[in-house]
Image (spheres, grey):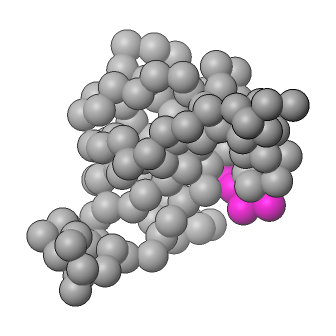
């Protein structure tokens, strides 16, 4: 198994299986679907380089780079993701504003409401 295949397998079989929750991902102009995401609900560190960001209204999320169980393309500024601010509460819409990282297995996205 090559490196890219290993990343894909680990994304689904380990990382998302252990830490993810359901979110609704709505690509701009496409059909919304329920996928798994790891939501980083910790606030950004205001003492670090991210101090100019709006700390209460942004989270990072990690989703699978897959056409069925995730997404294979991101439209910054237009794609929406719905999930609760606090786990167990009602969903809120978040707009994808930045791609923080992408590899063969996962996307790490900055979302803002």
What x and y, as percent, mark residue 69?
70, 29
Q: Quadrant of residue 28?
A: top left
Is residue 91 visible from the viewing direction of this image? no
Q: Quadrant of residue 18?
A: bottom right
x then y, percent, for residue 45: 31, 80
Residue ranking furthest to the top: 29
Q: Residue at x 37, y 76 (%)?
A: 43
- Horizontally, residue 68 falls left or right of residue 74, namely right
Q: Nearer the viewer, residue 104 or 108?
A: 104
Say which residue appears at 59% left-offset and 68% top-offset.
87
Residue in view at x 67 percent, y 44 percent? 36
Q: Is residue 63 above or below residue 34?
A: below
Magenta stretch contains residue 20:
yes
Residue 24: percent from left, percent from top: 55, 38
Q: How many marks?
A: 0
Image quarter where the N terminus lies is: top right
The residue positioned 12% from the left and 70% from the top of the image is 52
Quick check: is 16 in the magenta stretch? no
**As drawn, 20 above or below 23:** below
The residues colored magenta run: 17-24
For the view shown, which residue lies furthest in the front direction? 2
User: Is 12 left or right of 67, judged from the image as shown?
Assistant: right
- 55 on left or right of 106: left
Q: Residue furthest bottom?
A: 47
Residue 103 spot, x, y in % from top left: 55, 37
Looking at this view, is 78 or 7 the one in front? Answer: 7
Residue 79 visible to the viewer: yes
């Amino acid at each position: 198994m090559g490196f890219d295949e290993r990343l894909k397998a680990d994304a689904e079989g380990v990382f998302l299986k252990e830490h993810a929750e359901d979110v609704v991902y709505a690509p701009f102009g496409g059909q919304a679907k329920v996928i798994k995401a790891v939501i980083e609900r910790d606030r950004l560190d205001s003492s670090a380089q991210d101090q100019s960001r709006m700390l209460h209204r942004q989270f990072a999320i990690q989703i699978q780079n897959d056409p069925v169980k995730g997404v294979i393309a991101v439209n910054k500024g237009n794609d929406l993701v719905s999930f609760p601010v606090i786990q167990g509460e009602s969903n809120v819409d978040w707009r994808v504003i930045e791609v923080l990282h992408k590899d063969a297995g996962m996307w790490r996205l900055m979302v803002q409401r």
